Image (tube, rainbow, N blue to C red):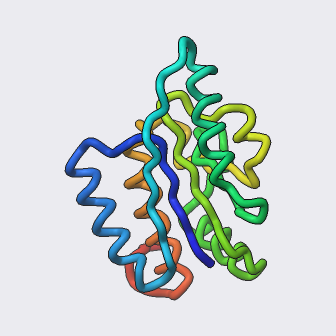
Amino acid sequence: MKISVWCIGKTDEKYLKDGMAIYLKRLKHYARVEWIEYKDVKPGSTPEETTHREADMILTQLKSDDFLILMDERGHSYTSVEFSAFIEKLQLQAVKHVIFLIGGAYGHHAQIRARANHAISLSMMTFSHQMVRLFLTEQLYRAFTILRNEKYHNE
């Protein structure tokens, strides 16, 4: 299973880039993980217009069999163990390509929500879309260590 993390906009903060690099390097032992940052779209006159432009950009990149997971504060909440079980379930279902989509500052447009196969919330709190990148990368690494019964997750 190939895992891609798609993000709208660049990560500006060095500490976030450094943290993501650590976990992406560790993830190489478990899965093929691709990281793609799409350029910010030209802001619209409203948040709706901006998210619509982002949706148009993303929808042209998706293939029909891609399993799209939105990172969204209104998505399904998991514990780390439950998230690892979710990842395992995708592997057992022979899903070929899982895409985690981290939207821009205004979240996801209705068109993207309609196309998505699933949505995940990392917390009931709202985080910047840049911080979510680090948190998701760490949780992916944690999920694989849980699945392999390796020392990292304490429970």
Tell me what residue is drawn at x 51 percent, y 59 percent.
5
> Total of numbered circles in the picture?
0
At a point 62% along the width and 78% down the height, the residue shown is: 1
Camera-side residue: 57 or 96?
Answer: 57
Q: Is residue 35 above or below residue 26?
A: above
Please report the residue visible at 64 percent of the width from the left and 66 percent of the height from the top.
98
Q: Quadrant of residue 50?
A: top right
State whether residue 35 is above or below residue 155: above
Q: Position of residue 122 (x, y in %)?
A: 53, 49
In the rendered image, residue 124, in percent from the top left (x then y), is placed at 55, 39
Q: Position of residue 24 (x, y in %)?
A: 37, 70
Res 25 → quadrant: bottom left
Q: Quadrant of residue 150?
A: bottom left
Of 64 and 22, nearer the camera is 64
Q: Is residue 63 left or right of residue 61?
A: right
Q: Residue at x 27, y 55 (%)?
A: 17
> Which residue is farthest top?
45
Relative to 146, is 48 on the left or the right? right
Vertically, is 130 above or below 41?
below
Image coords of residue 26 (percent x, y): 35, 77
